[in-house]
Image (cartoon, helix red, strand yellow):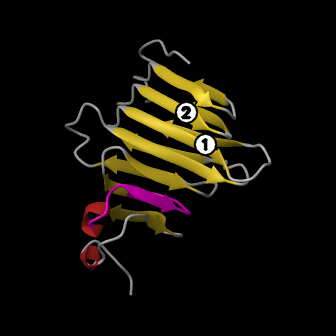
Amino acid sequence: AALDDAAVTFITGFERLTINDAGKAEKIDLANLGFTNYVTTTGSIAELNNLGNNGTVVVTTTETELAVGIKDAATGKADVLNVLLSSKDALAGNKLTAANVETLNVTSTDTDKTAHANALEVTATKATTITVSGNAGLELTLAETSTLVTLIDGSASTGGLKASTSASAAATTI
């Protein structure tokens, strides 16, 4: 049976959620699942709403587009989203929109011994800090509307960081 916002309240009691092939038009409200802090996706999701503050989204495929909403982020001032890009081969063409998130932590992980760099384009209009870590490289692109970012910290990345910013209202330290 297909699950929708009205029918998903019967699924409870798990710690991690994996969503396979949801489709770009899907809108998933994690509050309806009683689970809000760790989601893995193997494809694009139009909206992933009510993720807990400091929650984690894991991306394992290329060309993934995600719009993530942190629960109560519109009124919060210290909202954090953790994103894990994890694969044995380079993940290219990934896009993330993180509304009302002030801090974005990106971990780029290589699951085998062949070095590669993952790519992520970020739209985060409230973000001021982006921290990058992991053993795979990251090619990070900030969208034109991500103008509040003042710090991109790649000091914990052993795979390297290439960052591109197109517009900033304040100076950005990399």
- The three-letter amino acid code for the residue at tag 2 is Val
Question: Distance from label 1 to label 2 (Cα)?
Answer: 8 Å
| Residue in the picture at 39% in, 32% down | 103
What residue did someone put label 1 on?
108
User: Tag 2, which secondary structure?
Assistant: strand
Q: Which residues are magenta?
A: 34-47
Q: x%, y% of residue 162? A: 66, 28
Marker disc for residue 132 = 2
Examine the rendered structure and indicate whether residue 102 appears above or below residue 173. below
* Residue drawn at x 64%, y 42% as measured from the top left: 119
**In this rendering, would 99 be left or right of 64?**
left
> Position of 79 compared to 170: left or right?
left
Please state which amino acid type lies under the numbered disc 1: Ser
The residue furthest top is 171
Q: Position of residue 94 (x, y in %)?
A: 58, 48
Quadrant for the C terminus, please: top right
Of 43 and 25, which appears nearest the observer? 43
User: Which image quadrant for residue 13?
Assistant: bottom left
72 left or right of 148? left
Determine the residue positioned at 31% across, 37% down: 79
Examine the rendering and report whether any part of residue 123 can be seen.
Answer: no
- Residue 51 spot, x, y in % from top left: 33, 53
Image: 18 above or below 141: below
Q: Secondary structure at mark 1?
A: strand
Q: Residues within 10 Å of mark 1 (few under 14, many from 20)?
A: many
Image mark for residue 57: none
Asked if the magenta segment contains residue 121, the reply would be no
Which quadrant would residue 63 be assigned to in this image? bottom right
Cβ atoms under marks 1 and 2 closer than 8 Å? yes
